[in-house]
């Protein structure tokens, strides 16, 4: 329970917020002017201030500046009916915890207030890089288990099979195993099995001699030659053809390779780390993967969890990517608003860490202020075009808002526009399988505006 000071010159807004916060269990005091708010702050210790920006005598920004001079740690949430990027930037530059535009969704403002009134809020802290594995960002229970497994398996020569969806960071885990192995000074040689045509895969893995096939104008070393005495990383191992699987099995059993077109056998000493986004046990049952090869590769299996299973790492990753792309794109993006972070925390990230990185890179590139706001986030893909566009061809736009032309003049222009807006939003939601983010892109409005209109028209 917190003591919250609400500052707004509109009595209706003060009463609304007071009732809302009291239902949440908070104590509330109110002020209709900035000067009155300062008097309360001098006489009482509050835990949070929620203030309007546009107020007579003393503006919300001026009030914020005074509060931060006297108590820098006191969180202040700014709200306004006259939203503008300039207001948001000014508020955040002066130390506001967050900035919300009217009309706001109740869940939205409660989410921000909960973040501001709890110690474990979702604003990003400095990335927690593991002392042992600085290449991997994470401090969730799931990642700590992986760190422990890396420590245990890295010093051994055992082959490792890394499971995980695309974009989870399987190669980073493989690199960490190599870096902490006894052959860390030797080569770490990666190859993506799905990226090599099937007829060239044998040559890529084992090399070839001059004249072995058309185009073989000179001898060529393969992956295993380059990785000798080091580590070979075979990504997307489930894409190998049956013939190559058989040849790879021999490498694992006999520790020898033979270049394409050669009769010479070469002994090698290579530690193999493989990775896949497939369930190889299912591939074995379907006859697409050799069971004996599977057991040779999966001496030690490691599963890298999808990002949706380790949401606690999202703020750390966001902070890391913000710094990375602010530097690369020469932008001064300092932070992400707490509501924008809440949007990310509520997203499932089908593309995992790779998708999150893409979202932040795009947000940094498009953001005109020095803070990432919710409107700068594009989740689930970029603005839809082509087949995803609203297909209203063949329809009279006016008849989308009424059953007949006569009814148009009976119900009046305001009702016509409301009906039209409702139909367009419904159409957009249907086209995007009820993805509000994609629907907002189609309609070219902000995600926040769409949420408000969906609730207004009872479309949810």
Image (cartoon, rainbow, N blue to C red):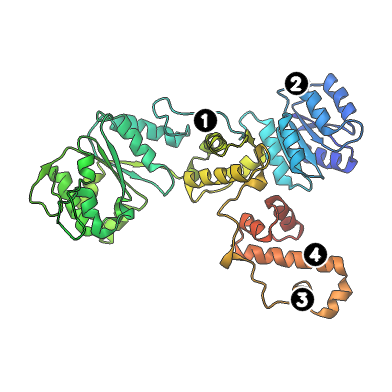
**Residue 178 image-quadrant placement:** top left
Q: Which mark is residue 110?
A: none
- Please give left or right for residue 274 compared with residue 257 in the image: right
**Disc 2 from disc 4: Cα separation:** 46 Å
Q: Which mark is residue 399?
A: 3
Q: Are marks 3 and 4 in contact (CB under 8 Å)?
A: no
Q: Which mark is residue 418?
A: 4
Q: Is residue 448 above or below residue 326?
A: below
Q: Position of residue 13 (x, y in %)?
A: 85, 42
Of the two numbered discs 3 and 2 on the same chain, state the one appearing first in sequence.
Answer: 2
Of the two numbered discs 4 and 1 on the same chain, state the one appearing first in sequence.
Answer: 1
The residue positioned 69% from the left and 31% from the top of the image is 117
Q: Position of residue 316 (x, y in %)?
A: 53, 34
The residue positioned 70% from the left and 23% from the top of the image is 73
Q: Residues within 10 Å of mark 2 (few under 14, many from 20)?
A: few
Figure quadrant of the C terminus: bottom right
Which residue is the extreme one toward the front? 217
Q: Nearer the viewer, mark 4 or mark 1?
A: 1
**Disc 3 from disc 1: Cα separation:** 54 Å
**Disc 4 from disc 1: Cα separation:** 47 Å
Q: Residue 370: in sight, yes or no?
A: yes
Residue topped by disc 2? 71
Residue topped by disc 1? 127
The residue positioned 72% from the left and 29% from the top of the image is 95
Q: Residues within 10 Å of mark 4 (few under 14, many from 20)?
A: few
**Disc 3 from disc 4: Cα separation:** 13 Å
């Amino acid at each position: 329970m917190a003591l919250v000071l609400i500052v707004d010159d509109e009595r209706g807004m003060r009463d609304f917020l007071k009732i809302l916060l009291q239902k949440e269990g908070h104590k509330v005091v109110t002020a209709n002017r900035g000067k009155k708010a300062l008097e309360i702050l001098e006489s009482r210790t509050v835990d949070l201030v929620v203030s309007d920006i546009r107020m007579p005598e003393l503006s919300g920004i001026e009030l914020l500046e005074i509060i931060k001079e006297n108590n820098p740690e006191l969180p202040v949430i700014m709200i306004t009916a006259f939203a503008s990027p300039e207001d948001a930037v000014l508020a955040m530059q002066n130390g506001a915890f967050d900035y919300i535009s009217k009309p706001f969704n109740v869940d939205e403002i409660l989410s921000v207030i909960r973040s501001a009134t709890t110690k474990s809020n979702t604003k990003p802290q400095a990335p927690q890089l593991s002392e042992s594995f600085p290449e991997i960002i994470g401090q969730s229970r799931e990642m700590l288990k992986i760190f422990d497994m890396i420590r245990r398996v890295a010093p051994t020569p055992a082959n490792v099979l890394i499971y995980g969806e695309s974009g989870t960071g399987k190669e980073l885990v493989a690199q960490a195993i190599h870096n902490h192995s006894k052959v860390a000074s030797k080569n770490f040689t990666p190859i993506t099995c799905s990226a090599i045509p099937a007829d060239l895969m044998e040559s890529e893995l084992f090399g070839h001699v001059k004249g072995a096939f058309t185009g073989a104008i000179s001898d060529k070393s393969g992956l295993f030659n380059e990785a000798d005495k080091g580590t070979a990383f075979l990504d997307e191992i489930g894409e190998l053809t049956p013939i190559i699987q058989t040849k790879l099995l021999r490498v694992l059993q006999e520790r020898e390779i033979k270049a394409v077109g050669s009769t010479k056998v070469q002994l090698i000493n290579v530690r193999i780390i493989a990775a896949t986004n497939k369930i190889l046990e299912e591939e074995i049952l379907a006859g697409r993967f050799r069971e004996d090869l599977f057991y040779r590769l999966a001496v030690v299996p490691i599963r890298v969890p999808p990002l949706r299973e380790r949401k606690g790492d999202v703020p750390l990753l966001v902070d890391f990517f913000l710094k990375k792309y602010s530097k690369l794109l020469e932008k001064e993006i300092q932070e992400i608003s707490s509501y924008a972070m809440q949007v990310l925390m509520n997203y499932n990230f089908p593309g995992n860490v790779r998708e999150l990185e893409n979202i932040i890179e795009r947000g940094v590139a498009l953001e005109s202020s020095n803070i990432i706001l919710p409107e700068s986030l594009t989740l689930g893909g970029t603005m839809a075009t082509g087949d995803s566009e609203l297909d209203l061809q063949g329809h009279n736009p006016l008849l989308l808002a009424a059953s007949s032309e006569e009814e148009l003049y009976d119900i009046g222009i305001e009702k016509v526009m409301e009906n039209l807006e409702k139909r367009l939003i419904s159409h957009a939601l249907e086209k995007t399988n009820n993805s509000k983010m994609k629907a907002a892109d189609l309609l070219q409005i902000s995600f926040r505006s769409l949420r408000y209109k969906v609730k207004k028209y009872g479309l949810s």
